[in-house]
Image (cartoon, rainbow, N blue to C red):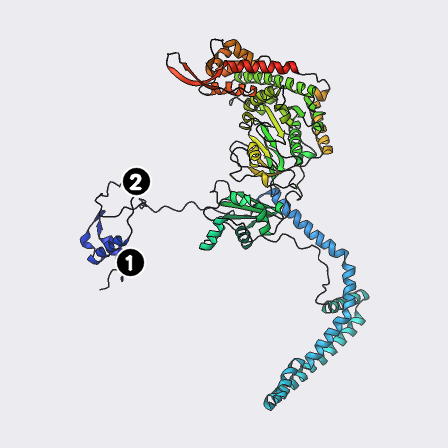
Amino acid sequence: MPGPDEGSDEELFRLLEAAFTDGEPVMDAVPAGVVDLDRARTARRPATTAPGPVPDDEEEDGTGPLYVDQPAPGPLPLPGPPVRRPILPAWLLSKTELRTQLTWATRQVGHTVAFHAVRSPLYAGRLAGRAPRGAARLATFLGRWSSDAEGAPLRAAAARTEDAAMYLKLTRQRDARVRLRGLVMFLGSLFGLAATIVLLVMTDVTTLVLLAAAVVAALGWAGAPADEPLISRSVVKAKAPKLTSDMVVRALEALGLAGITSARTKGTAITFPAPITRDGPGWRADVELPEGVTVADVMDRRERLASGLRRPLGTVWPSPMPDEHPGRLILWVGDQDMSKSKQPAWPLAKAGTVDLFEPVNFATDQRGAWVTIILMFMAGIIGAVPRMGKTFLLRLLLLIAALDPRAELHTYDLKGTGDLDPVGNQVSHRHRAGDDEEDIEYAIADLWALREELRRRTKAIRSLPRDICPENKVTSDLANNKTLGLHPIVIGVDECQVWFEHPKYGGEFEEICTDLVKRGPATGIVLLLATQRPDAKSIPSGISANAVLRLCLKVMGHTENDMVLGSGSFKRGVKATTFTRTDRGIAYYVGGEGADAQLIRSVYVDAPTAEAIAGRARVARERAGLLSGYALGTDTTPTPAGPSHDLLADILAVTTADEPKVWSETVVDRLAELRPDVYGPWAELTGRAKPDQLGTALKPYGISTVQVWGATEAGKGANRRGIVRTDILAAVTERDRNRDAG
């Protein structure tokens, strides 16, 4: 009898199945050899200790090992739902991609036909010039064939070796071939002569000329030199060859990443979950990086990756795959530099209006596909170093806003070069270019008026019936209702750091803009800020923490990168620091809360085109009767010219000298009693939101809240956030001194 090791697996499974009846083991049915062998194998297996509790059906007697990975009850789990690749290619499912491919094919064929048609006389001349050489080559070939010249070396070899038998055999074979081929040549010559005579007698001149041309062309083709082609190339071979897996692997291995080097040493190769495919004007490769290597590591070395692929830097764009682990890389390699490739025509450049509550095309991705933006319900930040397209991008967004006739624009060009004048002069309700004192005072007065408008809108929205305003925010239908006054208001500020760093009004600018960023989107007020110095002073934290729309062109460091794109973006591999000076207009775009950053190239609109678009927007406003303010020529200094209240003075009014420290929530409640129309919404806040609101309002004045010990209404002691009254007094004194000096 063979032992258990020597028997078949089927036999062993049959015995084990017979050993169980209704789930209870019957060990008598199992041969002793099988049981002993199983125990021996178990003894040789290293014992492990399970980290969790021991199952109820297992005894802790120490006689057997405990295994960490227990078999799952029931049927074996599947590895996961399969990812089905699309039946049709992506370019066939997209009208834009299909149109692009058909356009390319049509132009390619048309160019090739036209190219060779123009050069057809040259080709004919070349054929005629090569025809004598072709005739000589044909005669030589026929002569050698009829005389069996190809056998001459063999006959000569037989003669040299004095192999008489072989020589005679080859000679007889040659005589037979020559007789047969000579006959063929004679009959062919007779047939050719007869055909020529018939053609000359019975065929018209045109046919003869065509036949002669065909013969000359054939002889010319036969006489062509091997190193000189007859026709020229109509299309030069593309500099960007097809992307292959070998190219990708070599480039990744050249990055010098320890994880990739270690994986190559161990024999674990880089894998590709999907085939490398054509994706727009380039190639897409989905790459599974080795364990421990992240997409961010590869993005850090984008320049070296481009060198490894032997492609221009502007064509290589590694990015993480959404909803996958950090080691899944999407590598897109374009045919041309992204900044130099031809961008499709912007549909709004020639005609059309927009609805700011709906998506609008404003940029393209690496593949040339349109990227949309919804300006409503969000505040925006645009950051970049100088000369990278920041102002042009802001002007583009303002042009989009101008194409909605309902939108009221407030434009401020603090750089003073007039880049926003195409919009401001023709459309804007309020507009200034420059940072002179009168410009700053005009702007601060406008912002105070906008803050009052914000408060009016919150009350108007709160008073609307639920069926008309179900989400407590402005909608397109509400914006159409002129009686409600809830039309979109878009504020665009270039070089916003001038506002926030102003020695006199900086605190007020920060306070109002922070309020507009937090509460404005729901009421239809959009604030767009652009700066070439994206730091904490240029973009206060209260603004950067609440702005949803982020557009970051090239910046110099990770701090600036995260100030614009959000904290942690640099670590996640979203690095605008990798852009070069030639990547003008290229940016990372975050268009919604929680949305992944997207690489875009904004539409380029020069000043004349901007003037034309703004002119169309002005005409649409005039027809709708919505042109107002600066563009209409009725602009005056906005009122009120300053705040209708003084927060610091109000705090001093609701606290006394006998209260050196007061809880923030107590201060807020007292302020609400003093000015219900101003501070009433603060008092309605609950939990930590109430003291946080006061802390945010005091921050522009350089005042921080501190921990204050006090007693609750029940007399129980507690430690909460509060204000120090002497800090308020000091701030008021300093502010008054500065105003007097100014």
The label shown at residue 377 is: none
Q: Quadrant of the C terminus?
A: top right
Q: Amino acid at mark 1?
A: Glu
- The residue shown at (60%, 89%) is 163
Q: Secondary structure at mark 2?
A: loop
Mark 1: secondary structure: helix
Q: Is residue 634 visible?
A: yes
Closest to the observer: 114 or 205? 114
Q: Given the image, on which type of amino acid does mark 2 rest?
A: Gly
Q: Earlier in the sequence, mark 1 or mark 2?
A: 1
Instruction: Tell me the residue that label 2 is attached to.
Output: 52
Q: CA distance from mark 1 to mark 2?
A: 35 Å
35 relative to 364, above or below? below
Q: Residue at x 50, y 47 (%)?
A: 85
In the picture shown, does residue 102 fall above or below 608? Answer: below
Q: Nearer the viewer, mark 1 or mark 2?
A: 2
Residue at figure coordinates x 49%, y 16% from the top left: 723
Relative to 355, does residue 277 appear above or below in the rendering? below
Judge from the rendering whether residue 582 lies leftward or rightward of residue 545; answer left or right. right
> Looking at the image, can residue 212 be seen?
no
Q: Quadrant of residue 74?
A: top left
Marks 1/2 in contact by CB < 8 Å: the verdict is no
Disc 1 target residue? 10
Residue at position x 71%, y 65% in the image: 227
Crowding near the residue tagged with mark 1, few <14, some 14–19, many ≥20 C-alpha atoms within 10 Å: few
Quadrant including the N terminus:
bottom left
Task: Give how far across and how far down residue 724 sits, in percent.
Answer: 49, 15
Please name whichever residue, 28 or 202, is drawn nearer the observer in this view of the structure.
28
Within 10 angstroms of label 2, few (less than 14), some, or many (20 or more) residues?
Answer: few
Look at the picture and state if 21 lies above or below 487: below
List x then y, in percent, for residue 84.
48, 47
